[in-house]
Amino acid sequence: MAGRGNDDRKSCTIIWIIENFRYCWQKFRGFMDSPIFDFESLENTKWHLRLFPRGSKSENYIDVCLRRDEGGPELITLDFELVISSMNGSEYRRIYLEGQRFYETSYKKVLEMIDRCKVFEAKKNMFLKNESLLIQCRMWRTDGKELKEEQFIARTVAEIERGSFIWEMKYLTSNQIFEQTTQSITLPSKKAVFNLSPLLNEDSESVEEEFAMQITSDDESVKYFTFHCDLLDSLGNKLDCGEDEFWLNHLKEEAIFKLPYTHKKLIEERAKYLPKDVLSLRCDIVTSTGVTTDRIESYITGIDDNICEKIFEKYESGISPDLKADLKSMYREGTLSDTKIRTSTETFPAHTQILGARSPVFRAMFSTDMKERTKECVDITDLDSETVRRMLLYMYTDALEEDLQCQSACQLYAAADKPVFND
């Protein structure tokens, strides 16, 4: 069922950020769990989210389900909504379910949330910022009992290690084959060592085959790794040769990576691909041992009496006083402004370069042919004008007004979590 993003009922909310999601090692039907969240407003019941990085029904999808843990009443009935989005706020999928009955240690059906191919088409969209995924779950009571607004923000980090190197192989013109060499790469931790060697055949048919290399390692702590390769041509250009993923069993058996070029093509266009009779490959390896760290970063309920102190602590300025004064004047006077931010009651002149530098969402708006760019105005209708004014002031000066009242601070704190303002 389609989501209800504008639902203004008080809710219990989970925001779960998965860092380095791209390198989660779980295979088809493998899963990872969020931390457990205890909601007072839901009869002190405990909940967590379960994520299937490569699906539970189809390995082409990312699946999510909401699970209830032990404790609390035998049965609780809820409406709930699941949303998957990027860290820059680009929402991909929203699913809303009504009247769902949760018994202890029960879960609702696993929901196919998103096609993996669409997530990882990095060149076509900005879905993964810093290779992280954001899942939001909102829950509402259906029994009419009063619910206190509660929100948990949690983060799970999949620990990874990266290594890069240039691999140069000589082409032996006399024998018309590449030199048989092995390239070893030791990752920064010095725990994992990978060996790469070309797969060479001397028969005439092999020249029609794609150039391939074998990857091996004796390190059994590596559960999963990705390998990306670029060919460096005679002009120094990087020609993308693609990326592949491998698991531990591949290292024990045979991990083979193929270039999108045959031996024949490389040799026939030696001037381009083999300058000075050398094949140069830039290789990038990212490994995962399957280790993750979890933490609950914040719990928010109602109005926090210390919210002002938290905001000033979070947004402590690092800009020099003179530059801050100049930027503040530039904002207030609208000097050389080239766009507008419009609320339902007021319009603010602004500068695309500053907004783009401070917010990845604004940057995407101003660097593509989005509708906001064509009409040179960005509409933000879900925030009041005063909150937007204060938020823009912070974006320009990296500072907040010292006379900020508690209620205004709460509104500003909520606005800071809006994707368009979040950097």
Image: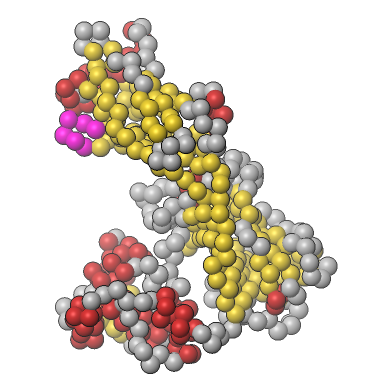
Q: Whole-percent x and y of residue 6?
A: 54, 76
Magenta-highlighted stretch: main secondary structure? Answer: loop
Question: Where is residue 78, by image quadrant?
Answer: bottom right
Residue 393 percent coordinates (x, y) = 31, 82
- Please report the residue visible at 37 percent of the width from the left and 67 percent of the height from the top: 423
Residue located farthest toward the front when viewing the structure as drawn: 190
Judge whether residue 236 is colored magenta.
yes
Q: Is residue 294 above or below residue 77?
A: above
Quarter of the figure that contains the N terminus: bottom right
Rendered position, 154 above or below 253: below
Q: Is residue 354 above or below residue 244?
A: below
Extent of the magenta region: 232-237
In this picture, is 388 found above or below 422? below
Horizontal arrangement in the rendering, residue 136 relative to residue 178 (left or right): right
Q: Is residue 89 visible?
A: yes
Could you tell me which residue is drawn at 38 percent across and 39 percent down?
Answer: 163
